[in-house]
Amino acid sequence: MIKTTQMDHDAIVIGAGFSGLAILHHLREIGLDTRVVEATDGVGGTWWINRYPGVRTDSEFHYYSFSFSKEVRDEWTWSQRYPDGAEVSDYLNFIADRLDLRRDIQLNSRVETARWHAEDALWEVTFADGTTKRARYLISAMGALSQAVFPTIDGIEAFAGAKYHTAAWPNDGVDFTGKRVGVIGVGASGIQIIPELAKQAEELFVFQRTPNYVVESNNDKVDQEWMQYVRDHYDEIFDRSALHPFGVDMEYPNASATEVSAEERRQIFESKWKEGGFHFANECFTDLASDAEASDLASEFIRSKIREIVDDSDTAELLCPKSYSFNGKRVPTGHGYYETFNRQNVHLLDAKSTAITRITEAGIVLGDTEYPLDAIVFATGFDAMTGTLTNIDIIGRDGVVLRDKWSEQGLRTNLGLSVHGYPNFLMSLGPQTPYSNLVVPIQLGAQWMQRFLKFLTEQGIEVFESSRTAEETWNDETVRGAEATVMSVEGPKAGAWFIGGNIPGKSLEYQVYLGGGQVYQEWCRQAEKDNYASFLSG
Ligand code: N01
């Protein structure tokens, strides 16, 4: 028994998405009284709040699923190779029901402050309504990309029409029929919403600053036979995904893009382009993420596809990324994205050479030209990885708020799981965890936490804290992992979120671990073999 009379629970987990559900299930299995507190009014995290038209996974269903529950595996049926957001949200709600998780999930509970009380060895969490809860462990399951950001554009408040952010979409949807709509942002969210808005809006104006290398997905229906095959092989699929650098169940290429003939290269690019999605990024060649020349070759191939698909040559040129190369920022997957620009009602505007100068009551002003609009959709992304953690006051052992520690000392974590100065605090998908299909590090992270907290209970250890040395070691490895990729050079050019480049004023540090998911898991296993020494030496 861990809980003392001063505590409401053994563990408080913030967030009821993929991470929160997995952690609740796994901590219950070891008998910890765990309470999930969720800011919104529903279960599903990312998939509950990002309900914009077109939202869907860019990972295929079979490796975008938990493998740990036989009941869920046997009873849940996926219908699409790339499930849409509603289907993923249904899946997570099915998990919450089937594993009887809801009785320990508290909705509409936004955490404002979490304070470590050393004398009682507990965390006290204060909610927006002023109520508090106390627990021995505090676990962040707030997601890697949950803190939505609006750009700082003069006059944004003056706009008289409707404003939406893709990550705060109205529950009942929005009808854009007959409207003049502007979209700011062409990252993964913009790329998904633009084709859907184009089908509804009378006129769609896309304000593009940095174009992306979009790989088409080629979605399919999942038939019964496919679903049964996946059901019968969930463990193998998960294990193969866990061994893959990007957490996907895909083939490994065996040649460098620079070693094969031009004709062979074109054939391989073509065949993987047809297969769609991340198959292009992962299966063509060994070095599209690690070698500048290989990345340039993939860039040129995608530019050739854009020129092939898009009828108007000026529009095609504007859609072609030229200021950074493929894999320089997170590759988005598309569903008819480039074709959308062949529609007469879609207008691509260059917000790079002529910046958006302001927003007025009537619309968006690009340079000196005002585009009158009925609605503006902000697909402007997130303060990734750290944003949710720095948005609340997490006050550690010395009274230091986590955001101040990171801004003064630099972004430091022990394996993205724990932070020196913040005892008994764990993070799922914390900063410096792998950049991959996130279901893999979420499930493996929840299972690692289960074993770690069981170990502490069995050893009678009340308080754990990572050492500063462990943080420096992991930071060195994070930098090493990133510097072995093209992202280290191309990411800053592209303003990529994984180096914090999308947030004005955010210091440029690697927000994610780019050394490969399987390498990261090896580090976690090693920490375990060492009896968690680096987590107990703070
Ligand atoms: O955000 P982003 P996102 N004027 O930061 C533009 C995941 N995700 O929400 O590049 C004009 O990528 C900005 O322009 P620029 C996925 O990991 C997954 O799209 O800074 N433009 C950029 O185009 C993804 O990587 C799925 O020049 C401005 C856009 O806004 C991550 O979330 C779906 C601007 C922001 O793009 C983030 O994607 C969706 C300004 N003042 C998201 N300010 C799946 O498929 C910003 N922009 C599972």
Image (cartoon, grey):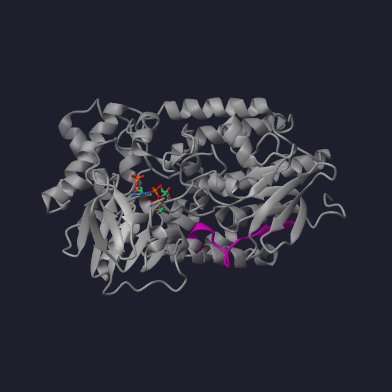
- Residue 61's x, y, as percent? 43, 56
- Give the residues drawn in magenta, as a range: 33-48
Q: At 17% from the left edge and 45% from the top edge, which residue is drawn? A: 317
Say which quadrant the C terminus sits in. Answer: top right
How many numbered circles does the render carry? 0
Is 227 a magenta residue?
Answer: no
Image quarter for residue 29? bottom right
User: Relative to residue 477, is residue 153 depicted above or below?
Assistant: below
User: Relative to residue 218, is residue 480 depicted above or below?
Assistant: above
Classify residue 282 as left or right of residue 443. Answer: left
Q: Nearer the viewer, residue 458 or 495?
A: 495
User: Relative to residue 1, is residue 243 depicted above or below?
Assistant: above
Q: Nearer the viewer, residue 262 or 409?
A: 409
Q: Nearer the viewer, residue 375 or 538?
A: 375
Q: At 42% from the left edge and 26% from the top edge, which residue is drawn? A: 484
Q: Nearer the viewer, residue 254 or 217?
A: 217
Classify residue 61 as left or right of residue 373. Answer: right
- Residue 142's x, y, as percent? 58, 52
Image quarter for residue 202? bottom left
Is 47 a magenta residue?
Answer: yes
Q: At 19% from the left edge and 65% from the top edge, which residue is drawn? A: 345
- Residue 148's x, y, as percent? 48, 54
- Can residue 444 be seen in this snapshot? yes
- Can residue 443 be seen in this snapshot? no
- Residue 387's x, y, as percent? 54, 47
Q: At 34% from the left edge and 65% from the top edge, which residue is drawn? A: 361
